[in-house]
Amino acid sequence: MPNKCYLLSQFYNFRFDPSSDLEENLDRFTKLIEDLANCHEKLFDDQQVVALLNSLSDKYKDIRIALEYGGQDLTFEIITLALKNKDLALKIESKDSKYGEGLHIKDKWNPIKKPPTYNFNLHKKGKLFRISNSKRSIKRM
């Protein structure tokens, strides 16, 4: 009985961990549901939906609002699909913003002849520039 009470407390107080990704958080939530089922505690779909919506972090706030007021019957599967779509969109958005600027360094080092020559390829908002200290030049590629 204490295990069942503990699991129920964990289930209703469950919150998404911001340091974990979406899949890990959903796995932890699903594991709690399975553990409760193993203790002969039946959770209705509505209980699972409400607990999952309440556990979402702020970065999924717009999804929570859209699902709550969307006018359709919510299931665990609908919510997880919407969250996965949002997570994918966030990953693509962050990948695009990271691509905007980058710096690649090539090091040509020969200890016998001369000091190293550095060539930098600089990505800035979709444009590629090459900077070389051997020719002291900047070229757009």
Image (cartoon, helix red, strand yellow):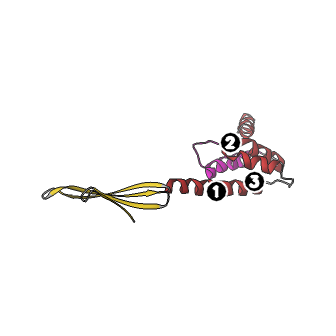
Q: Nearer the viewer, residue 3 or 119?
A: 119
Say what secondary structure mark 3 lies in.
helix
Q: Which mark is residue 67?
A: none
Is residue 80 rendered magenta in the image?
Answer: no
What is the distance, in whole Å, between disc 2 and disc 1 at their CAs? 15 Å
Magenta range = 16-39
Q: Give the image location of residue 105, x and y in percent.
A: 34, 56
What is the distance, in whole Å, between disc 3 and disc 2 at their CAs? 15 Å
Asked if marks 3 and 2 touch (Cβ < 8 Å), the reply is no
Q: Which mark is residue 79?
A: 3
Of the image marks 1 and 3, the number of the one nearer the N terminus:
3
Residue at 71% over, 35% down? 6
What is the distance, in whole Å, between disc 1 and disc 3 at their CAs? 15 Å
Amino acid under disc 3: Ile
Q: Quadrant of residue 110?
A: bottom left
Residue at 67% over, 54% down? 86
Is residue 37 rendered magenta in the image?
Answer: yes
Q: Residue furthest left?
A: 112
